[in-house]
Structure formats: C-alpha cells, structure tokens
Image (tube, grey):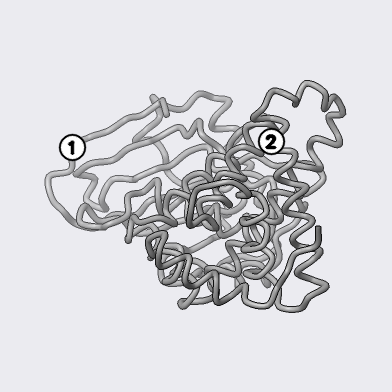
Amino acid sequence: MSGRVRKTRPDSQPFTVLVPLHNFNWDGNDFSISTLFSIKRLPSLPDLSWCESALSKCDRNELSSVSHWLSFEQSPHDELNQKEKLNIFLQTLWLVVPTKTQAKFRFEPPHQSGDGEHSCTRLLERFQWINPQSKDKVETKHLKQMDRYVDPMISIYRARKRLRNSLVLTHRGCTTIDWQVAVVCLSAAAEGILTYERGRGITHRLGKSFACLVETTLQRRDRAFKAFRHAYDVRSDIMHGRATQRRGPKKNLKEAARLSDMLRRLWKTILASKVILTELEKDDAGRKIWFTTLEKGYTPPP
C-alpha cells in the first residue's frame, strides 16, 4: 500500500472508515449488512481536503465517479483491523455474486472536531475478476444474502485457527491477475478446508470429502466428485510444470472460474452451518472422525 497520510490520534475513540466502491453497480441508495457495514449512495464527493496531498487530479476525478461508499466503525480495541473488515466485505460479496467491484482507497477522516488521527490509504492489493464469471450488477437480494455470511466469517477471523488460513488463501486467489496463481491459491484454500491426513490418494480423498460436504444425493455427489478431480488435475498441471501445454487463454480462465465457483460453494456451505464450521476448526483427528461419518456409505466413481 502507498500514498498514506497519517496523523497521530490522541485518544482511543471509535472512528469511521470510508471506502469508495469502484464498479459497484447497484440501483439502491442505502443498505446495512449485519451490524458492521453500511453502504450509502453519495450525491457528491465527501470532503477530502484533509488528505489532498495524497490524491492526484486523476484520483479525484475517479473518486467523483463512484456512486456508493462503504463505511464501518473502527476502534483501537477491535479484534479485527480495517484491512480484515474490508476483506470480509469483499469476500462475502464475492461469495454471493462475483462482480468487478474494487476498493482502491481507504479513508479514515478526522474527528468532527478536526483533531486526532486521520489517514488516506491507497490500496494496491485489489479484488480482480474473471470475465466468464463476473456479473455486471449487484441486486438488493445479493446484499441481503451477504448478511448471512458476515458474522460467521468474522468468527473465523477472530478465532485465528485452521479456517482462517484458507480464507487468506482465498483472498490471495481473488486478488491475483494470473490464472495460474489463482488456481494454486484457490485449490490450496480448498485443500486446507478438506484435508485431515497425509499420504497417497489425497486427490481422491479430498474429492470425496468435497462431494459429501456440498451434496447429499448419490448422483449429485458423483458430479461434484468428478468436478473436483478435474479442477485438481488443472492444479497438478501447474504444480508439475505441465501448464505450458495449456495455451488457450479463454479455456484457462474458464478453469479458474470453475474452481472459483466450487470454492464459493464450499465456503457458503461452511458459513451457513455452525456445526460444520466448528468441526472444520478441529485438529486432523477430530476432522477425520467427522468426515468419516459424513462420507459413510458413499463410494466415488472410478
């Protein structure tokens, strides 16, 4: 991150963080998500005179074209920092509907008195999109769906156990502009969610766990298992130096999109269930017991 202007805050009072949402195409005006986020349509650019030295004329012109701004409260005593909260918003939006929405700046305006700390942060690590996957519009129903996933994701960040690592890898996979990096990070995130032991046959084992976690009927589980195996074959091509044979850019992007959609499905299943979330935060032994019960009676196709 660069372009940062900061002034020391003399107290520990909560303050508001403002984030312009670039390419956030929503027809609504105001919306609150969980108890954490507020989205507002602003008729004009907020007063940014306090950080004028950090913004170029081009920056201000671009900010003037942004219709909606995200805001949330931050306290020095919060368990989650500003970056983590913003990541949670972007990740839950991606879960519900992948779009071209990006956060390019994060502003922490001064107190109403004009005193205290303030900062303007240019965000260089931005969510990217995959053309075959991204949607043009955000609908109100999508924002309502996000509400279901925010609090469970907050709990994962706060717990800082096994699933948090997969959330971080998911974020890395969503911010890269290279399809190979995306596939490696997203597949690593899935493996971090599903694994419970080392040894041979890991692809088969992960595929079986994935299929039984996201589906309940035999036919659907078979399709999910085959889709996971295919995605892992693409990942293996990259890891073992065979990706140079994959010279079709459009096909490679489709493969990345398929894996992205599979991981979105996996996260939505986990975040919608406190039981699943609790089980997947356990150690390998605990996970193995739970997955063995979940997979009982299911034999994947050859």
Q: Nearer the viewer, residue 284 or 62?
A: 284
Residue sitting at the far front: 200
Q: Residues within 10 Å of mark 2 (few under 14, many from 20)?
A: some
Task: Name the mark on residue 8.
Answer: 1
Q: Amino acid at mark 1?
A: Thr
Identify which residue is drawn at 78% across, 55% down. Answer: 227
Residue 289 lies left or right of residue 141; in this view the side is left
When asked about the image quadrant of residue 127, the answer is top right
Can you give x and y, in whole percent of width and height, for residue 218 in the image? 78, 75
Q: Is residue 213 above or below residue 182?
A: below
Label pair 1/2, CB-CB below 8 angstroms: no
Identify which residue is drawn at 72% across, 53% down. Answer: 228
Q: Is residue 90 above or below residue 131?
A: below
When asked about the image quadrant of residue 205, the answer is bottom right
Identify which residue is drawn at 40% across, 42% down. Answer: 107
Q: Is residue 202 above or below residue 241?
A: below
Can you give x and y, in whole percent of width and height, for residue 95 in the image? 62, 59
Residue receiving disc 2: 236
Can you give x and y, in whole percent of width and height, for residue 219 in the image? 83, 73
When asked about the image quadrant of residue 233, the answer is top right
Q: Which quarter shows the N terminus?
A: top left
Residue 208 lies left or right of residue 114; in this view the side is right
Can you give x and y, in whole percent of width and height, for residue 56 in the image? 50, 24
Q: Amino acid at mark 2?
A: Ser
Instruction: Mark 1 or mark 2: name the one nearer the start of the chain.
Output: 1
Residue 94 lies left or right of residue 277; in this view the side is right
Q: Nearer the viewer, residue 139 or 235?
A: 235
